[in-house]
Amino acid sequence: MKICDRCYTEVAVDAEFCTECGAPVNGGTADAADAAVYPQLAKANLLRMRGDYEEAEKDCLAVLKQFPYNSTAHILLGDIHLDKGDSSVALDWYELAADLEPTNPSLAAKRDRLRGAREKTVSKQTLAGLEVPPSGARTAVMYGGIAVIVIGIAIGAFFMGQARADGGDVNVDDLIRPISIGEEAPPDPRVALPGDDPEPAATTTAPPASQSTAPQAMTAEEIRIMRDAAARLGTLGPRLIHIDFDPRTSSSRATVTASGDADFIDAARVAVAVFQASPQTSRVHLRVIDTSAGFAKLIATVSQESLSEASRHEEGSAEWATALLTNVSQR
């Protein structure tokens, strides 16, 4: 018997794919696992072409429940959401599929096309925020300021004439004073960009332009971290499907599949396992993917500080998970 590298299930020595998760073994390819569920995938694709997206999605998710590492089901879910017009969710599925098939050229083309469209949308929104007021408005402000200055000079000249007619001495400095249009200089404008953090710009560090929030193919070190963490998690281990470690910030990003109401506590357990598997990690960013709905169900961050705070509570309790997970976003 052999052990599957993905879910650690025992498989036959000559098996081409794991019967538990569908991952290729013994040098096999994803085609072997596809053959086992080909009728269901073919039916889902036919339903997609007929426009029955809901049923097509159900069939794909049923395949993933049996074989969570089936890349064809991930790609087909991306196609379904793209046909529905939800390109953001489609891109998420393509990114997950690319983790499983990093050398698939047609998949890479789909993913890159949607990435480009997303970048163009962000660029348009940025440019819209940088638009200056119409020239007509600026002209009106300028002429209004000139009019105020002229009126002020005229009033000063009138009082000077009155004083001279009365034969009195006139202190010009008392009659003609500098006229200020607004007592304080206006503050420098700050253009609000989509997704801006409300903190001052000086404390905000933008990520490098080449850095993507989508998961990429794992390095040997990331695979080691994921295997070690999965082994520590026991039956929860097969739900950990991706680890991304950034040595520049000593942070790790873990992607986990959802299973129900226990996701909050399970996500906390995954973060702890990643910390234990990678002592150099200072922060873990979690993403729980709900395969039954097709989107990220939970996003959260775990830091060394929150890890210390959670140690005051019983491990596995709701209070422990609440103290551990920060910056939580749920659907």
Image (cartoon, rainbow, N blue to C red):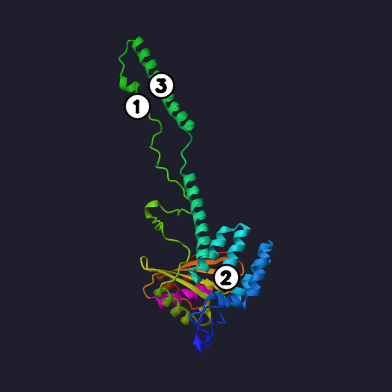
Q: Which residues are magenta?
A: 265-278
Residue at the spot 50% in from the left edge and 67% down from the top edge: 104
**Secondary structure beneath label 3:** helix
Left or right: residue 177 versus residue 265 is left
Quarter of the image with the C terminus in it = bottom right
- Residue 72's tag is 2
Cα distance, mark 3 to mark 2?
Answer: 76 Å
- Mark 2 Cα-neighbour bin, 10 Å: few <14, some 14–19, many ≥20: many
Is residue 328 something one can see in this rendering? no
Query: Which SS type dominates the magenta stretch?
Result: helix
- The correct choice, above or below, for 266 with respect to 199 in the image is below
Tally of numbered tags: 3
Q: Nearer the viewer, mark 1 or mark 3?
A: 3
**Secondary structure beneath label 1:** loop
Which amino acid type is shown beneath numbered disc 1?
A: Pro
Nearest the viewer among 244 and 172 is 244
Would you name the residue on which mark 1 appears? 178
Left or right: residue 72 versus residue 55 is left
- Residue 150's tag is 3
Does residue 276 belong to the magenta stretch? yes
Which amino acid type is shown beneath numbered disc 2?
A: Thr
Nearest the viewer among 209 and 146 is 209
Residue at the spot 34% in from the left edge and 26% down from the top edge: 178
Which label's residue is closer to the chain start, 2 or 1? Answer: 2
On the image, the x and y values in percent for residue 187 come to: 40, 41
Cα distance, mark 1 to mark 3?
Answer: 12 Å
Which amino acid type is shown beneath numbered disc 3?
A: Val
On the image, the x and y values in percent for residue 138 come to: 45, 32
Q: Nearer the viewer, mark 2 or mark 1?
A: 2
Nearest the viewer among 298 and 291 is 291
- Mark 1 Cα-neighbour bin, 10 Å: few <14, some 14–19, many ≥20: few
